[in-house]
Every structure is written in C-alpha cells, then in structure tokens.
Image: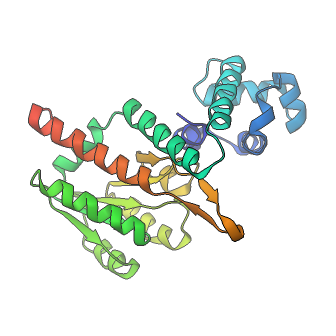
Amino acid sequence: MRLEEIINKYYNQLHENDFHILKYILNHRDTCYELGINSLADKCNVSRSSVLRLAQKLGFSGYSEFRVFLKWQEQEETAAGKSGVDSLQADIQETLKYAHSHDFSELCALIRRQERIFVYGTGTVQLNCADELQRMFLAVDKHLHVIRAQREFELVLSQVTERDLVIIISFSGDTPSLFPSVQTLVTKGVPFISLTNLKNNRLARMTPYNLYASSSEVALAGGIRTASFASFFIIGEMLFRQYADDQKNGSLH
C-alpha cells in the first residue's frame, strides 16, 4: 500500500498539523526517510510527539516502522527506472501487487446486491474502460449502464436510489466539475465505487469503496507529458474475474 492510499484511508482522522507534516514528507520523498524523528520534527517546525502521533494515526506502531515504510517505498520508486517502457512495466507491477493484496469480495457483493449499476468515465479513455467493464459483466448476466456525458450523469442522479450503484472512473480523482454530482450521491445515500490513480485524491476520500490503478506520467519529446491507462483496464479485469469466481463458488451474497 502506498502512502497516498494510506492518507486516503485515514483522511478523516487527520488534522491540519498532520497535513503540514505530510506535505513535507510528500515533497521530500527521496530524503525524508533518512531523518530521525527529531530531525523531521525540526524540518516541519513541530514537536516530536506530533510526528509520533501522525505515524500512529496512519496505522504504524511508531515512527521507526513509518520510517522503514518510507524507505521501502522510495527504493521501489527509484528502482522503477526512467524510460517509458520501464515506467509502464513498473506501473503494471505496482497495480498487480495492489490487486493481489486487495480484497474485492465486498465490492463484488455490492455489485451483486444492487438493482442497477451505472458506470461513468470522466474522459474518453475512462469511457473506454467503462465500456470494457460493461462488456465483461454481460458474461455473468450483470448489466452495467455506461454514462457518457456530464449532463447525462446529472440526469441519472435524479433517478438513482440507495438500491443502485455508481462506478466512477477518473484518472486524477480531482476533477472539479465532478464533485457537485458526487456530493448528491453522498447526500442521497447512493453507494459508489471510485477507480482512480494511486494517489491522494478527493474522490477516493468521499467513498469507502475505492479501487486504485498505478499510472505515472512520462515525458515525451517537446515537453509533452502522457500517462498510460493500461493499469486501469487491469483493475477492471481483476474486479470482473473476482466477481465471476465468487459467483461460480457461490460466495456472493
């Protein structure tokens, strides 16, 4: 599990002082794991106990365990390589590692229980991913309705109930135009699953049903930057295959 995912998990338990420390850590990933607790506290201009409490809020036994985690994560990211091919390979490996360690059973049960399932992608490639989900789930007699535009999403919101499910696919998880609609889902008590890049983002924080794919940007000639969506399709396939396995084994409820 990456630090961004841990922050999302415990976000509601964190305070302003915690975010101040985390901002420093996220901006100094390559060196902060070398700092002892007193040194990190000095860098952030906070007390030693503030750093210790943050580590414990994030689920670590203490700062020493947190520091080992930061070192392990930095070594993994450094080893990922710099070329586009190496970056893609690292993203896929990270996504597969996440998928193998993630329990999909609750999401599969949710998909099984809800009467209607809507899938909304915030962009062209996200919609391609939604179409692929729709295609796969047809094989297990589960019909997903793909929402193709923001206006269509807003119209669907007036009709959905607690018996429905919405899956939202967003690369960043921070698309501003998305959040009035998401807030409506929260207010109406409609469950929704977010599929976003593996980083701290607002969409993932708004639902307990999170899926993550690892996708890093690559610099191209002319200063252009791009990112692959291959890992998003992998997570979609993992969700479908787990659902199919659970259905075959009779473990869906």
Residue 236 in the figure: left or right of residue 96: left
Q: Nearer the viewer, residue 241 or 151?
A: 241
Q: Which residue is found at the position 31% from the left and 60% from the top?
A: 166
Q: Nearer the viewer, residue 129 or 110?
A: 129
Q: Which residue is found at the position 16% from the left and 42% from the top?
A: 244
Figure check: 209 above or below 102:
below
Badge count:
0
Q: Quadrant of residue 248?
A: top left
Q: Which residue is found at the position 61% from the left and 56% from the top?
A: 217
Residue 199 in the figure: left or right of residue 38: left
Q: Residue placed farthest to the bottom in the image?
A: 151
Position in image of residue 49 (x %, y %):
78, 24
Q: Quadrant of residue 30?
A: top right
Q: Which corner quadrant holds the C terminus?
A: top left
Position in image of residue 133 (x %, y %):
26, 57
> How are the residues colored?
rainbow
Residue 246 in the figure: left or right of residue 182: left
Figure check: 136 above or below 249:
below
Figure check: 22 above or below 217:
above
Position in image of residue 55 (x %, y %):
67, 27
For residue 19, say whether it is visible. yes
Residue 64 in the figure: left or right of residue 105: right
Position in image of residue 50 (x %, y %):
77, 30
For residue 253, say whether it is visible. no
